[in-house]
């Protein structure tokens, strides 16, 4: 049953459990009320019968007192025979007289409803208690009433038992039962109203609570990166406040951990990059040192080719120095990027101007909207376009005519910028590392272009992805949130 109810929504489950509790409570109260009502009815009739029994015994004692010393078990019949109907009429109930052995002697009953001979159980009880005994049973007719019977000893002037008095008393509980059913009906109506009002109230409260929880869930789903998540603002003082505070505390911890992890990753990346730069700088320094040492060892002022050797050595040294300078400049470009200065620009026009330096028969620019205005840094955008387009051109083999397509489109509140080439493609084994700062496939490259593009796009919460087919070409897709 519990597993089945768990398939329903929270309001339905709460209402279902509330109904079970209220129905159990209502049933318990109704049963307790009915049982109490029946017990009170029985005590009421027993009290009436006790009072009648006391009155009958008082009248019988009055009659027996007229015969002091003569009232015995043997002559009790003629003494009470003429007075029994009178006493019965006065108290408005039937009277039955038994001898001490339980045999019926006198009765005012028309029908033989009482015992002809008392059961031994009643006689035993009388002998043990010598007091008033009440017994009751359901009536034989269909009225639903009960028959009460009292049994007690009749004593003479000397206190001796001379007979047994039995007073049968049939109740009529029709009006009392009607009162009970009326009361139970009122209880049922009250509980029905409570059930209806309680169900509506619980549904409204749980629905409002769930609406708040769903809104919080939407906020959590809509936020992507931990660094961009905002704390949930909630002014209530209920249990939901605890949940919101826990989420906000967890968010702060995750942001701090994310910041520490990013810092560690950046430091590790810079260490790797520094090692790569040092390695690249050492590469030209070693042949330069060897060349100078060789030149010094073979230096001869009388050599006819001295000038020519010196010029050749100088040119080689200058080439190596240019290589070192290029490495230093590339490292400076990546490490010391200009301060970001966003301004509202037409990015379509900026891209068009950036592509102006490339041959028009090779690089084609496609756009659907002639104007896409958003906040962006011009220099950053130029670096992105120049690096990706230059990589696309360099990927095309020399025996193939390059065909580069650059396209931009504003769709679903995102700017999509694609650069497609017809080059050699990116081999699968190096695809996972092409955005690493130290990775390059060119002899003269530093592997800085694509990492710098990725860093710029991430500064704007953007992404860069690619699809590549070997010997067919590669398509880079950059996605930037539109900020008008």
Image (spheres, rainbow, N blue to C red):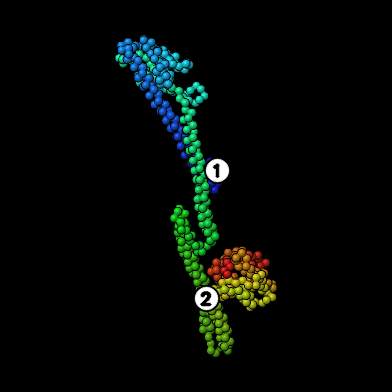
Q: Does residue 160 lie above or below 343 as drawn?
A: above
Which circle marks residue 338 in the picture? 2
Q: Position of residue 218 (x, y in %)?
A: 54, 57
Around disc 2, counting alpha carbons within 10 Å, would you say few (fewer than 14), some (14 to 19), or many (20 or more)?
Answer: few
For the C terminus, the quadrant is bottom right
**Looking at this view, is 90 or 126 the one in front?**
90
Name the residue located 40 percent from the left edge and 15 percent from the top edge.
Answer: 84
Q: CA distance from mark 2 to mark 1?
A: 63 Å
Q: Please identify the quarter of the rendering in which residue 246 is found.
A: bottom left
**Residue 449 picture location, percent across and down:** 57, 72
Q: Is residue 302 above or below residue 371?
A: below
Q: Name the disc covering residue 464, or none.
A: none
Q: Nearer the viewer, mark 2 or mark 1?
A: 1
Mark identifier at residue 4: 1
Report which quarter residue 418 is drawn in: bottom right
Q: Residue at x 60, y 72 (%)?
A: 373
**On the picture, is 176 further left or further right than 358?**
left
Q: Earlier in the sequence, mark 2 or mark 1?
A: 1
Along the viewing direction, whichever of 296 and 248 lies nearer the viewer: 248
Q: Position of residue 347 (x, y in %)?
A: 60, 73
Horizontally, residue 152 falls left or right of residue 350, namely left
Residue 391 appears in the rendering: no
Residue 204 vs 291, above or below: the answer is above
Q: Residue at x 55, y 46 (%)?
A: 7
Which structural element holds mark 2?
A: loop
Number of numbered discs = 2
């Amino acid at each position: 049953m519990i597993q089945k109810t768990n398939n329903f929504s929270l309001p339905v489950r709460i209402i279902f459990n509330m109904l079970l509790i209220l129905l159990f409570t209502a049933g318990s109260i109704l049963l307790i009320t009915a049982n109490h009502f029946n017990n009170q009815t029985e005590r009421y009739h027993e009290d009436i019968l006790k009072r009648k029994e006391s009155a009958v015994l008082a009248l019988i004692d009055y009659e027996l007192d007229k015969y002091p010393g003569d009232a015995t078990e043997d002559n009790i019949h003629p003494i009470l025979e003429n007075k029994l109907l009178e006493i019965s009429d006065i108290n408005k109930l039937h009277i039955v007289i038994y001898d001490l052995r339980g045999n019926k002697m006198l009765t005012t009953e028309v029908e033989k409803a009482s015992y002809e001979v008392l059961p031994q159980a009643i006689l035993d009880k009388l002998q043990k208690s010598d007091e008033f005994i009440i017994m009751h049973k359901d009536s034989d007719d269909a009225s639903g009433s009960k028959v009460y019977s009292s049994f007690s000893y009749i004593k003479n002037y000397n206190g001796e038992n001379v007979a047994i008095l039995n007073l049968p008393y049939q109740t009529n509980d029709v009006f009392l039962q009607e009162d009970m059913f009326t009361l139970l009906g009122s209880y049922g109506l009250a509980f029905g109203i409570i059930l209806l009002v309680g169900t509506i109230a619980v549904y409204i409260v749980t629905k409002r609570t769930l609406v708040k929880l769903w809104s919080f869930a939407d906020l959590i789903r809509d936020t992507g990166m931990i660094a961009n998540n905002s704390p949930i603002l909630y002014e209530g003082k209920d249990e939901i406040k605890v949940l919101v505070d826990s989420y906000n505390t967890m968010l702060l911890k995750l942001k701090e951990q994310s910041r520490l992890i990013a810092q560690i990753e950046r430091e590790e990346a810079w260490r790797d990059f520094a090692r790569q730069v040092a390695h690249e700088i050492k590469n030209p320094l070693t042949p330069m040192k060897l060349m100078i040492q060789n030149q010094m060892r073979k230096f001869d002022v009388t050599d006819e080719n001295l000038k020519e050797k010196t010029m050749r050595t100088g040119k080689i040294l200058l080439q190596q120095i240019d290589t070192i300078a290029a490495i230093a400049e590339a490292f400076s470009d990546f490490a010391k990027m200009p301060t970001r200065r966003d301004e509202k620009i037409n990015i379509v026009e900026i891209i068009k101007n950036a592509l102006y330096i490339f041959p028009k028969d090779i690089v084609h620019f496609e756009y659907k909207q002639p104007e896409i205005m958003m906040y962006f840094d011009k220099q950053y955008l130029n670096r992105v376009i120049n690096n990706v387009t230059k990589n696309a051109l360099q990927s095309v083999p020399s025996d193939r005519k390059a065909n580069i397509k650059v396209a931009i489109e504003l769709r679903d509140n995102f700017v999509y910028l694609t650069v497609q080439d017809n080059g050699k493609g990116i081999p699968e084994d190096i695809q996972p590392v092409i955005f690493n700062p130290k990775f390059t496939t060119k002899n003269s490259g530093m592997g800085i272009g694509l990492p710098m593009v990725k860093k710029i796009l991430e500064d704007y919460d953007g992404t860069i992805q690619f699809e590549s087919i070997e010997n067919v070409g590669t398509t880079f897709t950059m996605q930037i949130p539109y900020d008008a």
